[in-house]
């Protein structure tokens, strides 16, 4: 019997700058407290169903199934399993998508899903030595095989800006908006404090266009992506409870209308959300003009702006409280953070009825999810 999946009890850690507040904390240290808090919120609301699974996205962790380890560390008991998903920057959103499909099918009725990343404690890896040479530091996974473009994301963002005619000035203007909005927002209700860290570490007031204009390009002298109009390398975790509409009756919830993934040109991975969003809107019959809020991972201002231009989005509806440019981008967690952000804004009094979350993914992929407020 099919069930309508909903998201309840959205929570996240503060987003930490890599090497700072969470410098010594592992994926387990970050994810376990959020898992505990989400389950506690469910129990406090009278939801007694057992947890069928824990599904977490993660990109650069130690392996060994961080979701299962975090579930055990959270005190869920040996009977609660866990599985870890890797779709790079879309991992946290993909984890929720997979959980939702299982709930929709009727196979499960309560899954805790989200993502976690600890860039600070990610293990160092090395490629095996070749012909007696010294091992070479493994800095990131290949996003595409030999013969395909496989640019670093910053280089790709610069190239995307050039191809689409997105000026440095426009990128800085968008970034200034993100910094300003985040600096004036109150995220306390969605955050689970970790130790002494109670707020997002990267957020700074006063990041004006004039200040941003003074920053040098980060990925080449002719580039336009800078430390101010790009995200920071970050640590963090986010979790939502994915359950049936009947089980969550009476709770503040977001109904999952649909989701989609799509492939795109590996040379321009920042455009990956475009085909995913188009597929999702086509499947659901929703027009882009109906979207009340759009949360896109702000890895780079050029990426958000290129996606917005391609789809004809209303920029005022994109990340209305700021995004990863101001707050940081803990890769495997970011997709789930988007859903936490949607919930905080959509479930408040007078919040928009329809919201969309989307991520660009290295190697040329996109993922998107459409949610609506349960009245």
Image (cartoon, grey):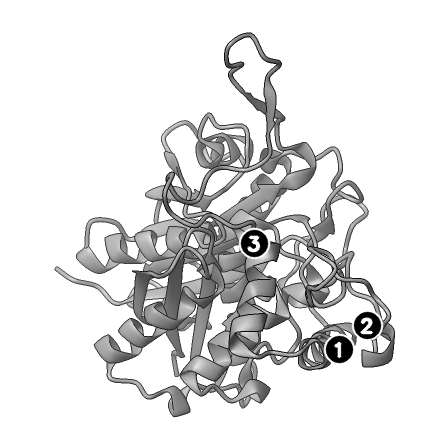
Q: Which mark is residue 212?
A: 2
Residue 62, x across and y down, in percent: 54, 28
Q: Which mark is residue 153?
A: 3
- Name which residue lies at 37% across and 34% down: 81
- Point out the residue furthest to the top here: 132
Side of 293 relative to 277 (left or right): right
Are the residues tagged 3 and 2 within 8 Å (C-beta)?
A: no
Give neighbour class at mark 1: few <14, some 14-19, many 20+ (Cα, 10 Å): many
- When the figure is inspected, residue 16 is found, relative to residue 190, above or below; the finding is above
Are the residues tagged 1 and 2 within 8 Å (C-beta)?
A: yes
State the quadrant of the N terminus.
bottom left
Asked whether 344 or 66 is in front, the reply is 66
- When the figure is inspected, residue 261 is found, relative to residue 84, above or below; the finding is below
Distance CA(mark 3)–CA(mark 1): 21 Å
**Based on the displayed image, in which of its 4 quarters is residue 122 positioned?**
top right
Give neighbour class at mark 2: few <14, some 14-19, many 20+ (Cα, 10 Å): many
Residue 214, x across and y down, in percent: 86, 70
- Name which residue lies at 56% across and 54% down: 153
Q: Which mark is residue 176?
A: 1
Foreground tag (1 vs 2): 2
- Point out the residue furthest to the left here: 1
Residue 249, x across and y down, in percent: 35, 70
First in sequence: mark 3 or mark 1? 3
Side of 12 relative to 243 (left or right): right
- Name which residue lies at 67% across and 76% down: 171
Foreground tag (3 vs 1): 3
Asked whether 3 or 315 is in front, the reply is 315
First in sequence: mark 1 or mark 2? 1
């Amino acid at each position: 019997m099919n069930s309508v999946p909903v998201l309840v009890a959205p929570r996240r850690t503060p987003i930490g700058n890599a090497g700072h507040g969470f410098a010594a904390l592992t994926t387990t240290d970050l994810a376990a407290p959020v898992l505990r808090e989400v389950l506690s919120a469910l129990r406090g609301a009278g939801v007694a169903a057992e947890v069928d699974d824990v599904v977490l996205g993660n990109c650069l962790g130690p392996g060994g199934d961080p979701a299962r380890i975090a579930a055990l560390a959270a005190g869920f008991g040996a009977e609660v399993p866990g599985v870890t998903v890797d779709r790079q920057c879309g991992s946290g959103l993909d984890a929720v998508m997979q959980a939702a499909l299982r709930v929709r099918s009727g196979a499960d009725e309560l899954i805790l899903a989200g993502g976690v990343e600890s860039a600070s404690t990610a293990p160092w890896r090395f490629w095996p030595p070749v012909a007696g040479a010294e091992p070479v530091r493994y800095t990131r996974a290949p996003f595409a095989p030999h013969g395909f473009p496989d640019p670093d994301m910053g280089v790709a963002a610069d190239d995307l800006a050039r191809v689409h005619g997105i000026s440095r000035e426009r990128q800085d203007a968008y970034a200034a908006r993100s910094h300003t909005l985040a600096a004036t927002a109150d995220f306390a209700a969605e955050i689970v404090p970790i130790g002494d860290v109670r707020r997002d570490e990267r957020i700074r007031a006063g990041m004006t266009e004039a200040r941003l204009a003074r920053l040098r390009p980060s990925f080449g002298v002719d580039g336009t992506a800078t430390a101010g109009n790009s995200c920071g390398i970050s640590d963090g975790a986010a979790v939502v409870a994915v359950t049936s509409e009947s089980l969550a009756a009476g709770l503040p919830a977001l109904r999952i209308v649909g989701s989609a993934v799509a492939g795109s040109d590996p040379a321009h991975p920042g455009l990956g959300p475009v085909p995913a969003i188009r597929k999702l809107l086509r499947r659901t019959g929703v027009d882009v003009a109906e979207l009340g809020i759009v949360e896109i991972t702000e890895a780079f201002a050029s990426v958000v702006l290129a996606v917005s231009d391609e789809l004809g989005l209303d920029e005022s509806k994109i990340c209305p409280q700021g995004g990863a440019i101001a707050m940081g981008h803990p890769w495997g967690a970011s997709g789930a953070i988007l859903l936490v952000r949607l919930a905080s804004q959509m479930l408040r009094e007078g919040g928009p009825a329809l919201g969309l979350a989307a991520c660009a993914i290295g190697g040329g992929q996109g993922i998107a999810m459409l949610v609506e407020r349960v009245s």
